[in-house]
Amino acid sequence: MKKHLTFKNIAIFLVFLLLAIQSIRIDKTIEAVNPSTDFIELTSANSEVANTLKISCYDCHSNQPTYPWYTNIAPVSWWIKHHINEGSHHLNFSIWGTYKEKRKNHKLDECVEMVEEGEMPMSSYTLMHSEAKLTDAQKLQLVEFFKSQKTIMAEPSEEEHH
């Protein structure tokens, strides 16, 4: 008896595969926050800025992501976890206090650029989290806040070069 690849057989296989991959779960461990290294705590951000950062940035750029219901469904969960890992690797507000001043200033410059150009928060994130979409006023407020946090790094004087 010869089996044919039919639409029905392919559909059954795909459903079985989708069910089988549900057993591969992502790690949803949330690390404790150390207030002595957290960006919001260290910068004494006002409540508006802190709220905006938590809603629009902290899910991907901290050790404190929230995991909505759809992170229980593979392969969507894998994709989201990848974004969280990538985002917190690039910039992690939870460990801000461990960054050297030069790195902090560089990250603040990047934050300004990303917010001004509308690259952050990512549109793929705001699609499912409409509350994270920044208004023009929030963008301006965040940009000004990030700029205000930059430290002036002393340039070596000419005398030090000789």
Image (cartoon, rainbow, N blue to C red):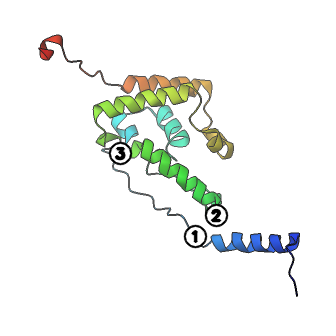
Residue behind mark 1: 24
Q: Residue at x 70, y 72 (%)?
A: 17
The amino acid on which the numbered mark 1 sits, given as a three-letter code, is Ile
Q: Residues within 10 Å of mark 1 (few under 14, many from 20)?
A: few
Residue 46 or residue 59, whichever sits in front: 59
Q: Quadrant of residue 107?
A: top left
**Percent coordinates x, y for residue 136 in the rendering:** 61, 24
Tell whether 35 sits left or right of 133.
left
Residue 29 or residue 49, whichever sits in front: 29
**Percent coordinates x, y for residue 3 in the rendering:** 86, 81
Q: CA distance from mark 3 to mark 1?
A: 29 Å
Q: Is residue 3 visible?
A: yes
Q: Nearer the viewer, mark 3 or mark 2?
A: 2
The amino acid on which the numbered mark 2 sits, given as a three-letter code, is Ala
Residue behind mark 3: 95
Q: Residues within 10 Å of mark 2 (few under 14, many from 20)?
A: some
Residue behind mark 2: 74
Tell whether 11 sits left or right of 122.
right
Q: Quadrant of residue 45?
A: top left
Indicate the quadrant containing the C terminus: top left, top right, bottom left or bottom right: top left
SS at mark 1?
Answer: loop
Dot 3 or dot 2: first in sequence order is 2
Tell whether 4 sits left or right of 104.
right
SS at mark 3?
Answer: helix
Q: Residue at x 38, y 56 (%)?
A: 32
Q: Are marks 3 and 2 in contact (CB under 8 Å)?
A: no
Which label is found at residue 67? none
Q: CA distance from mark 3 to mark 2?
A: 29 Å
> Vertical placement of 138 versus 74: above or below?
above
Q: Are marks 2 and 1 in contact (CB under 8 Å)?
A: yes
Tell whether 103 sits left or right of 74.
left
